[in-house]
Amino acid sequence: MTVIASRKCPPCDVAISCLKGLLRKKTLAMTAWEELSELWFEPKIKWLPKLDNYCRINDLLSLKEFTLLSPQDFIRMFTIENNLIQSQTEGLSQADTLIQPQPSGNCMNWVLGHILESQVSLLTVLGGISPIDPAGLAIYQRESDPITTGQPGVLPLEYLLEQINAVHAALVACLAEMSDADFSREIQQGERKVTLGWRLLFLHFHYTYHVGQLELLRQLAGRSEKVV
């Protein structure tokens, strides 16, 4: 019996967005397709819902004529996202960024620090040199404790934004020197190899996930204007 994936399945919607919006003409390493199917689909799901029809996942896995976004595409995206970070934090105080979501969650200060830490990871993957010491971002790492007022090591808002801009500039400079061929180069990721382009795409997804959180955290500080 063929199992059909629900059109309302959020993971499938994410996969569709990736497939329709982020893939183009040339070669996408098979490891990318394998990672996509392993992360988002149960083994028995045989079909991937599209906007207008259904397409077998196995057929998708056999396709090889695609490429990831180019270095110039990433420069444009990172520039837009950096501008969004500046807009979503404009006019806020340090106290505003330390307001804790209820009943749980991370404040804007933690999110900004984690965005900065994510930028450093992106830059490192590209072979760039970070203008900030990653050791100073320990309290902003994944699964770290929520940040509260007066906690040791909490960085000021102005400093976080300054360093986000600095690492952004380093990212852009690094990407400007790269080509599509660089993105096709294989790198070691855990126990397997993936292309540099695919690794960058995954880290960029994580980075933008947290950039999107800034809108709600700005509203938590009492700012209801439509920034985006």
Image (cartoon, helix red, strand yellow):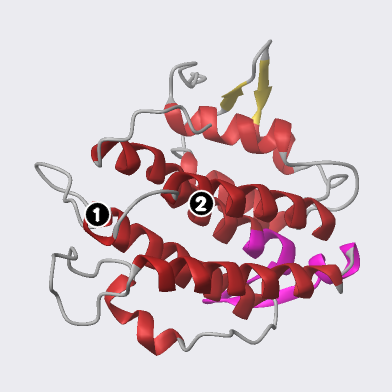
Residues under numbered marks 1 and 2 in contact, where contact means CB atoms less than 8 Å apart: no
Q: Does 95 sit above or below residue 218?
A: below
Instruction: Give the residue pinned by disc 1.
Output: 107
Which image quadrant for residue 53?
top right
Judge left or right: residue 16 versus residue 117: right
* Residue under numbered circle 2: 85
Name, please, the residue furthest toward the top: 52
Q: Is residue 95 magenta?
A: no
User: CA gap, disc 1 to disc 2?
Assistant: 15 Å
Q: Residue furthest left?
A: 103
Q: Residue at x 72, y 34 (%)?
A: 21
Residue 51 location, quadrant: top right
Q: Nearer the viewer, residue 115 or 3?
A: 115
User: What amino acid is at disc 2?
Assistant: Ile
Q: Can you give x and y, in whole percent of width and height, for residue 99 in the image?
A: 18, 51
Q: Amino acid at mark 1?
A: Cys
In the rendered structure, the answer to whether residue 213 lies left or right of residue 85 reads left
Q: Is residue 214 left or right of residue 202?
A: left
Q: Give how far across and how far down residue 182 sits, in percent.
A: 84, 71
Q: Identify the mark at residue 216; answer none if there is no mark.
A: none
Mark 1: give few (<14), some (14-19) or many (20+) Cα within 10 Å.
Answer: many
Q: If you read the primary sequence from the N terminus, does the residue marked by circle 1 or circle 2 appear first?
A: 2
- Find numbered disc 2 in the image and state the secondary structure of the residue it sits on: helix
The correct choice, above or below, for 145 with respect to 136 in the image is above
